[in-house]
Amino acid sequence: VHFPKAGVHVQFECEHIEDGVAFSIHKNRTLVQIVRMGDNLGWDLRVEDHGGGKYVLRSREGSVSFNTAVDEDGLAVFHINQTIRTTDFVEHCFDLVNPDGNNWFAGPHKYYQHWPSQVLQFTDDAYLPKESSHSSISERYWLTSKGMFIYFSDRTPLFLNRKPNHLCFAAKKQNPYYTYDTVFVFNYTIGIAADARKAHKAAVGRYLRKPLHYPDRRVIQHPKWILRNHNMSQVQEYIDNLLYYNFSTSSIILDKSWETCTGALEFDPIKFPNVGSMIRYFRRHRTHLTLTVTPYIHEDCNPYFQDALSRGFLVKTHQNTYLNFDRTATVDFTQVAARRWFLARLKDLQALGVDNFYFEGGEFDSAPNDPNFEGVSTSLHPIQYTIDSLRALAEFDHNTIVRTGFCTQDLPLLLRLPDMDNRWDIQNGLDSLIPKILQTNLNGYYFLMAPIGGTTSEGLTKELYIRWMQAVVFLPSMAFSTPPWEFDDETIELAQKFIRLHMRHVSLFVDLFKLAKSDGDPVNLPIWWLYPQNWRAQETHDQYLLGEDIIVAPVLKPNSLERGIFLPYGIWRDGNDNSSLYQGPRWLPSYRAPLDVLPYFVRARNKN
């Protein structure tokens, strides 16, 4: 199959080869990728030219169609489509080893979030957003340094496997997908461009949605303060401390312990005996109140559970059960009436004076195993639950905070990154933060919030806290899960310093949001975005960009007072010393960064 304008050639290998049938992709006579399709098609294969750019690879066992979609200067795109019986299994494996080198990017969130992504490990992982494996963002999108992107249909029951030298995508009818029909599809798209940047820009708009709007300026300007298991007097004391230490009181987030019981969506009268008084206190200090809400209702939380059950608003399984392992049930957001019922209860809270909500849930495993979503296309089980949840929340209030997404990049919701642990390493610690930021942006989710510190204060040292704070300064929203005064005066002063640094760039964030809306460019970019062919830029996992003009290089190792920094093409001014200019590309082996310094560089513009 030839793409003459793009300089791309796809060649089918229909003879006996290791691991069955394959096709290879070449760009300007250079090998880009080999895709091994296994041996389930048999060996009596032939290629049929159906005209119009459609080719069919056929045997007695079945067929695979290849459809040319785009052939233009610098870009080739084609679709692979296969219809499969429910009892069958198909797996296509992509080579991770290339004679000229090849790095992979994007893919799903993982507990161990590596960058580049080809070292991520998968063992029969359902390719869906799920809380249980820290995979809240699992867009079916991959990108390589050779200028190739892959995008899999949301209607394919897809699983991921990492094999020696191969990344494999398997399609099969197994839980958690719908298993009660007779056939399913295995559909995906491959695009080939000159480099990773151009390939990604081609994918955005075609497959990854551009945001149609973006969060309000007030949502990102001031930090958010996350309070765990606080009562009314403790909340007011927290605000008093913010005022005493000269911090903004603009936004307080209460965790889910504010409720009477899980799913009540009513303030616990013991913890919050006078909600009206508390709201008036918030108003006096111009503080916005955000409540954490979930889609769950505990079976003992009545009359709310019985009300939802009697109305048919809870997700039920094909075995007509409702409960999750923790004796909660899940509100069925695939039902219009259930969505309205849930959102009406949020409106009641708004009537009390609550400003905003953080929705904790929405991944497919928020619902019980083997859910029965009536009225939903069976090929979209169970992912339609995530999509409908988030679209309902965005329609209700586009400033809602969420923690997951799937095909919802067009929504202006602020996305909270997965909960992390108070540790330095790649095992869900600080060293995994920037890979998560980059992965999320390349999947099309740009409006990020990454709480400073892990889910608790346990194990959070002063040094880790400060370095974590520095790492998120140039993200759209800063959020503190532990207040600075739990350490010492120096920590308080540094928190004030880096909050001011964030606030100085709010106008830039808004400009980048507008660019994301118009062009689809990520807000926080990998370093290779400015130097896509350079291996060092491709493999830089501990730096990121804010737009194309600021390089951020936080210290991510304990007991470190310096670090190496890679500067791509351009002239870069040291953000901590305006008199220092550097011509890139350049490696700075030992940039000094004591505890009060965040290394960052700003592109120097020609005044003429």
Image (cartoon, grey):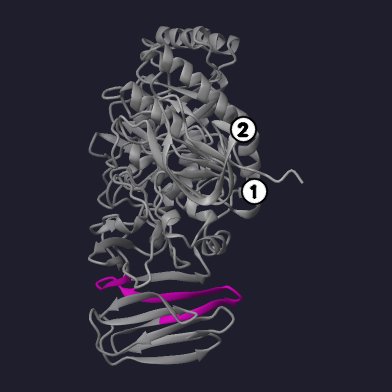
Q: Residue 582 in the image: x percent, y percent?
A: 55, 44
Residue closest to the eye, 395 or 450:
450
Q: Is residue 66 one of those drawn in magenta?
A: yes
Crowding at mark 1 (Cα within 10 Å: few <14, some 14-19, many 20+):
some
Residue span colored magenta = 65-94
Residue located beneath label 1 in the image: 515
The structure residue drawn at horizontal position 25% and vertical position 50%, both measured from the top left corner, is 319
Residue closest to the eye, 5 or 416:
5
- Name the mark on residue 506: 2
Q: Residue 447 in the image: x percent, y percent?
A: 53, 41
Q: Marks 1 and 2: in contact by CB < 8 Å?
A: no
Q: How many marks?
A: 2
The Cα–Cα distance between marks 2 and 1, rounded to whole angstroms, is: 14 Å
Q: Main SS type for the magenta part?
A: strand
Identified by mark 2, the residue type is Val
Identified by mark 1, the residue type is Leu
Q: Residue 170 in the image: x percent, y percent?
A: 30, 67
Quick check: 179 left or right of 286?
A: left
- Mark positioned earlier in the residue sequence (2 or 1): 2
The structure residue drawn at horizontal position 52% and vertical position 9%, both measured from the top left corner, is 243
557 w.r.t. 55: above or below: above
Look at the image and tell me whether residue 320 can be seen.
yes
Residue closest to the eye, 103 or 330:
103
43 w.r.t. 119: above or below: below
Tag 1, which secondary structure?
A: helix
Quick check: 229 left or right of 278?
A: left
257 w.r.t. 17: above or below: above
